[in-house]
Amino acid sequence: MLEESVLVVNEAVRIPLAELHYQFVRSSGPGGQHVNRSATQVELTFDLANSLSLTDEQKARIRIALKSYVDKDGVLHLASQTFRSQLQNREDVTVRFAELMRRALRVPKKRRPTRPTAASKERRLESKRRQSKVKRERRFTPMD
């Protein structure tokens, strides 16, 4: 997944690590003095709008799929504070970024419409006949 200075998203997309920017801030939540004194939370930002490693089509697909992560300036934001270690959080956020990008760039297969089989048509019609018979038998028929 990580080569020397490139993050491999899939066969077609490789993002230089220079395009990923990391910022370290203090994590929230319990942890006592450790959490109050160490900046272990990692915030990853990726300038999607100005990235040279993606085509316009790929940028558009990512912007739509990851719209909750992308701000109005076209910058993608991710954060990780799962671990107590800055290094582990950095690795975690990088792996999550690659997975999100991989999913966003996946092009769904086009659906090919198919016709119902003769057997499925017959099953549907038989079910309708059965239901019709049940409803017919529920009707009130006056006695002579």
Image (cartoon, helix red, strand yellow):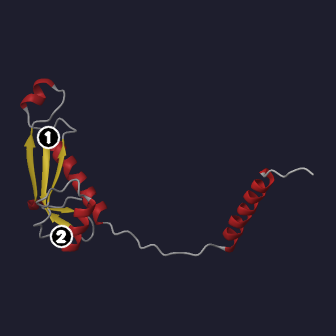
- How far apart are labels 1 and 2 at the CA level? 27 Å
| Residue 84 place in picture, x, y as percent | 17, 35
Residue at (16%, 47%) from the top-left corner? 90
75 vs 8, left or right, is left
Residue at (18%, 43%) from the top-left corner? 89
Q: As shown in the figure, which amino acid type bears the numbered disc 1? A: Gln
| SS of the residue under disc 1 | strand
Above or below 141: residue 26: above
- Give me the disc on residue 54: 2
83 vs 142, left or right, is left
Q: Which residue is mark 1?
A: 41
- Most distant residue in the right direction: 144
| Residue 118 place in picture, x, y as percent | 68, 74
Q: As shown in the figure, which amino acid type bears the numbered disc 2? A: Leu
Residue at (77%, 54%) from the top-left corner? 134
Of residues 78 and 134, which is closer to you in this image? 134
Quarter of the image that includes the N terminus: bottom left
Above or below 114: residue 137: above
Residue 56 quadrant: bottom left
| Residue 46 place in picture, x, y as percent | 13, 58
| Residue 94 place in picture, x, y as percent | 19, 52
